[in-house]
Amino acid sequence: MKKVKLNYSHKNSIATLTLDDGKGNILDNVMMNEILECFAEFREKKNLKMIIIEGAGKHFSFGASVEEHTKALASSMLKTFHSIFRTISEIKIPTLAKVSGQCLGGGMELALMCNLIFADKTAKFAQPEITLGVFPPPASLLLELKIGYAKAEEILLTGRTYNAEEALGLGFINKVFDDKEELNKGTLKWLTEYILPKSASSLRIAVSAMRFKFNHILSNFLPYLEEIYLEKLMETKDANEGINAFIEKRKPVWKNM
């Protein structure tokens, strides 16, 4: 069964990509490859004006699969995951993440990569990787670009959770609605007023222009952070201990090395 549902609306000018694994919408290798398949299809849709990414059920996504963060699988997982970010930057179609519930780790990184994030008041955002002894390569770039070093570093070093109002105040989400129903209604109204009347080709050129520096930084530095993750971080005892402790449902015992 597919883990990603794809729907077109408004005369095929809006694509909605729904993460749906029946649980926490975990971004495992299967789901990530299905996302890439969807984006490959989007390349051929010349009249596409907006891609919406949302999660089925109560949550957006619990993040990338921790089991696939183990040393044996980390290289394959990161290459697939980072391909999503490169692909979004390449196709230049405007993107919007609609967030309810938990939006954690890789899920938050996927949302951050979008041009816009709309959320309801149930939304919870966090980059908790540091609590597992690792770090999030895309978020290490995206957060600083979106909200500046001071707050980005706090999010990345503490791993704490932020509610929707806090996220709005920090500036990495754009709108907050009372509940999921209002989120859906409000997003539709916003699309109708601000996106649907515009030219699809002009929207893509505008995204290309406004993200020129953003994409340059991402394409040049993400491979370097991937290298640090695989060749330095995953060679430490604590990174492997943190991942294994999570999988084994126990507290990690740090060796500080």
Image (cartoon, helix red, strand yellow):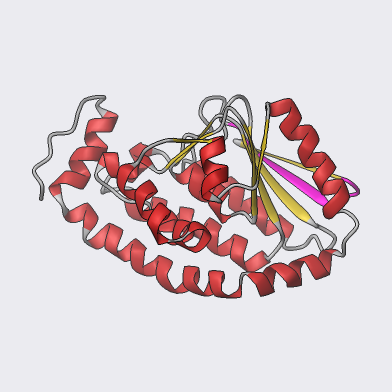
Location of residue 201 in the rendering, given as x and y in whole percent from the top left corner: 82, 69
Measured from the top left, where is residue 237 in percent x and y?
Answer: 13, 47
Vertical relation: 191 (above or below) 202: above
Q: Is residue 250 left or right of residue 217?
A: left
Q: Residue furthest front?
A: 169
- Residue pictured at 56% horizontal, 37% vertical: 165
Q: Which residues are magenta?
A: 10-20
The answer to whether residue 18 is magenta is yes
Residue 13 sits above or below residue 60 on the image: below
Front in this rendered view, residue 222 or 7:
222
- State left or right for residue 31 relative to residue 193: left
x 43%, y 43%: residue: 105
Q: Is residue 162 above or below residue 199?
A: above
Instruction: Give coordinates of residue 150: x percent, y percent.
Output: 39, 57
11, 112: nearer the viewer? 112
Residue drawn at x 59%, y 53% is 36
- Image-based side of 144 in relation to 16, left or right: left
Q: Quadrant of residue 185?
A: top right
Front residue of this view, candidates 2 and 252:
252
On the image, the x and y values in percent for residue 28 come to 46, 41
The quadrant of the picture occupied by the N terminus is top right
Q: How many marks?
A: 0
Res. 189 image quadrant: top right
Q: Residue at x 68, y 54 (%)?
A: 95
Res 79 seen here: no
Give yes or no for residue 158 being in the magenta stretch: no
Residue 50 shows in the view: yes
